[in-house]
Amino acid sequence: SSLRYCRLRVAVMSTFQWYKNLPVGQQVGAFFATGNAMGAIYGTNQRLKDEKNKRSDCQMLTMYRMPQSVDKQFQEHWNNSASLAQRQPGYEYTKMYKTLDWGETPFDYLCLRMWSRMEDYRRAQQHPTHKELEKRIKDLGVKWEDVEYKTVIDDSVLRTIY
């Protein structure tokens, strides 16, 4: 260990001496080249780390309100819509929640859908089949509101399966 330290110290000192003996123009060039190389190494490591832990942040929250009498029909149309979304580029997952106190909450269903990018969500919304399913849901008397959310705090555990 101390031998490695001594060799490292000799290498650093000889590099410093070499740098000190360079003309000023070459010192500036060496300084910028070193900074460029260090920046490239840091940037590459940061990009690889970000790609490994990539998490999307295009969350669409949809709140549905409807008469309880159309609940089963809504579920059927919504399931068809969800199945279509699963086949679209950029789709990641959906979580759907149903109220336990029908009519006592601001919404009857709450849908959280994650997309890779907002462009993927918008493209899926323009799909002709999606528009037809949306019309069928609207014809049931269902009202809804779509809102985009961004993650501010996430204390969930990221589990990676190898």
Image (spheres, rainbow, N blue to C red):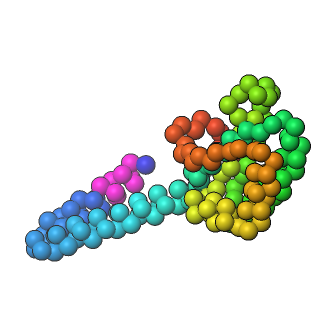
147 vs 63, left or right, is: left
Q: Position of residue 5 (x, y in %)?
A: 36, 51
Residue at the spot 67% in from the left edge and 61% down from the top edge: 125
Q: Is residue 90 visible?
A: no
The residue lying at 65 percent from left, 39 percent from top is: 157
Examine the image and state in which quarter residue 155 appears.
top right
Q: Is residue 103 above or below residue 84?
A: above
Can you see residue 39? yes
Front residue of 86 and 1: 86
User: In the rendered image of this protein, does residue 99 appear above or below residue 90?
Assistant: above
Residue 73 location in percent, x, y?
A: 88, 47
Point out the residue furthest to the left here. 24
Q: In this image, 54 relative to 34: left or right?
A: right
Q: Main secondary structure of the magenta part?
A: helix
**What residue sits 81% from the left and 48% below the top?**
140
Instruction: Tell me: 143 left or right of 34.
Output: right
Residue 68 percent coordinates (x, y): 84, 35
Q: In terms of image quadrants, where is residue 54?
A: bottom right
Determine the residue positioned at 87% across, 50% down: 76
Magenta stretch holds residue 131: no
Magenta residues span 2-9
Total numbered labels: 0
Which of 145/119 is in front? 145
